[in-house]
Image (cartoon, grey):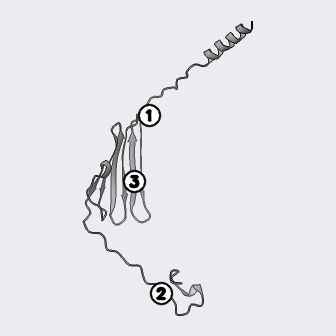
Amino acid sequence: MKCFIIFSVMIVAIGAHRLVQPEQYAPIPYSFSYASDLVDGGINALQEEGDGKGRVSGSYTCQGEDGLGRVGDYIADENGFRATIRTNEPGTANQNPADLVIESTAANTLPAVRTAPACQTSSTRSSLQASRCPICS
């Protein structure tokens, strides 16, 4: 009788332990975009779409009020991630590091470097408030 009970419990345990297959869902494609005006007068924008099967493509834009900026186009699919960046920012050049294409229309000169203004301090150093420059105090 003990053997029958043990055998019955084993059969129930084996029958209860079956592989559960996850429910399959249809791919859900998506698409979104946004654009915003920045406080400094520039713009920031992004648009992206995906087919729900792992393929994604999109583009982003970052541009300052001075007109300098970049546009990045990207694709991610079964062939990996690929991106192209178009820019007019100074100090950039056409290049292709790590399969990232950078197309630059910037001049080959770097912008002029501005020096920091000189510290202006009062003639008496009786208090920390007498100085207009915290570095010179």
Does label 2 or label 1 sit earlier along the sequence?
Answer: 1
Residue in the image at 71% along x and 8% along y: 3
Q: Which quarter of the picture shows residue 126?
A: bottom right
Across and down, in percent, residue 7 comes to: 67, 10
Amino acid, disc 3:
Ala
**Residue ranking furthest to the right:** 1
Does label 1 or label 3 sit earlier along the sequence?
Answer: 1
Residue in the image at 34% along x and 66% along y: 66
Residue 17 visible from this viewpoint: yes
Q: Is residue 105 left or right of residue 19?
A: left
Q: Is residue 76 above or below residue 94?
A: above
In this figure, which residue is indicated by the disc labeled 2? 120
- In terms of secondary structure, where does tag 1 sit? loop
Does label 2 or label 3 sit earlier along the sequence?
Answer: 3
In terms of depth relative to the viewer, which is nearer, 98 or 57?
Answer: 98
Packing grade of label 1 (10 A; few <14, some 14-19, many >=20) is few
- In terms of secondary structure, where does tag 2 sit? loop
Amino acid, disc 1:
Ile
In this figure, which residue is indicated by the disc labeled 3? 45
Q: Which mark is residue 28?
A: 1
Contact between labelled residues 3 and 2, with CB atoms less than 8 Å apart: no
**Residue ranking furthest to the bottom:** 123
